[in-house]
Image (cartoon, rainbow, N blue to C red):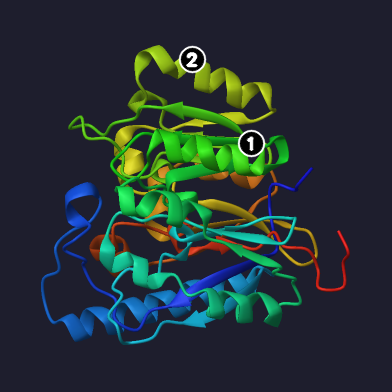
Amino acid sequence: MCDQTTNTILMVRPAAFGSNPTTLASNAFQSQAVGDPDQICVDATREFDALVAAIRAAGVRVALIDDTPFPTKPDAVYPNNWFTTHPDGRAILYPMLAVSRRLERRPDALQAASSSTGLDLRLIDSTLVREFEGKDRFLEGTGSMVFDRANQIAYACRSPRTDEGVFHRLCSMIEYEPVLFDATDAKGRPYYHANVMLSVGADFAVVCLESIDAAQRDNLRTRLESTGHEIIDITRDQAAGFAANVIELRSTSGARVLALSDAALTALGTSAQTLERKGLALAHAPIPTIERFGGGSVRCMIAEFFLPAAHSTA
């Protein structure tokens, strides 16, 4: 059984951050860029560095990849969409909707980053990319899915970026139970990724229940509660403020950490105190430029390492 949280993550420092016109149609959280593109990138990089500092100050190990300026990759700051890692030493690559985002997949950089933290990346598995991307069927990592690693469950909501068949194929590959549902925002649009309306920690789940199809709502609540997760129910308005786009990590000493943006902290309101009472230290920073023009918040910016140690034979 895998732990739900990790003390080692990967983040990608942006080189050409900006609003990506090819992702606007499916991401209602994203705004079209206004203003000087160079200044937007400068502001986003400053926000990124402050967030990394806050997470490191909480004792979490952060491996950094510097994005390359060419070819331009405006969404490179969101690496959790293109890979996940697993205790058997695998990294799985994912088929992505926007052609421009497929350039973000950098297996060599991933290999170097994992090695720098003393982890053993034994296999980079591109099965899903080969089988589905050319057929316009997509699954965007832990954006599309929210993993309950401790109980081997994957949660996902249908969207243009989350294909049911690819989701089931992934769950078969990693031997996880698939839980698929439909969730929409206040205007009836499917959430582009599950991780903007659901976050699963060790013993809690931040979830926007009102967004879930009524026929599926009780099933999702029951599944979460049956695995020992206290439900922190948020509204669609709170989800729009990135209240669910948060992630539980742990420090290298084992302390619980919740990484989130200042906007998410505000949107959570008194629920943040509930999480603090559970013993989670809140590692947060303001990232308004990244949230506004990228359409994702802190959870989207973090890719977790669950690889074995380099000396392990597991």
Q: Earlier in the sequence, mark 1 or mark 2?
A: 1
Where's residue 131, x and y in %?
A: 44, 50
Q: Which residue is drawn at 70% across and 79% down?
A: 115
Mark 1 or 2, which is nearer the eye? 1
Q: Quadrant of residue 211?
A: top left
Where's residue 209, x and y in %?
A: 41, 26
Q: Residue at x 19, y 61 (%)?
A: 22
Secondary structure beneath label 1: loop
Q: Mark 2 points at which residue?
A: 218
- Left or right of residue 105: residue 151: right
Q: Is residue 201 visible?
A: no
Q: Residue at x 66, y 65 (%)?
A: 123
Q: What residue type is labelled 1?
A: Tyr
Q: Mark 1 points at which residue?
A: 176
Where's residue 11, x and y in %?
A: 51, 72
Give the mark count.
2
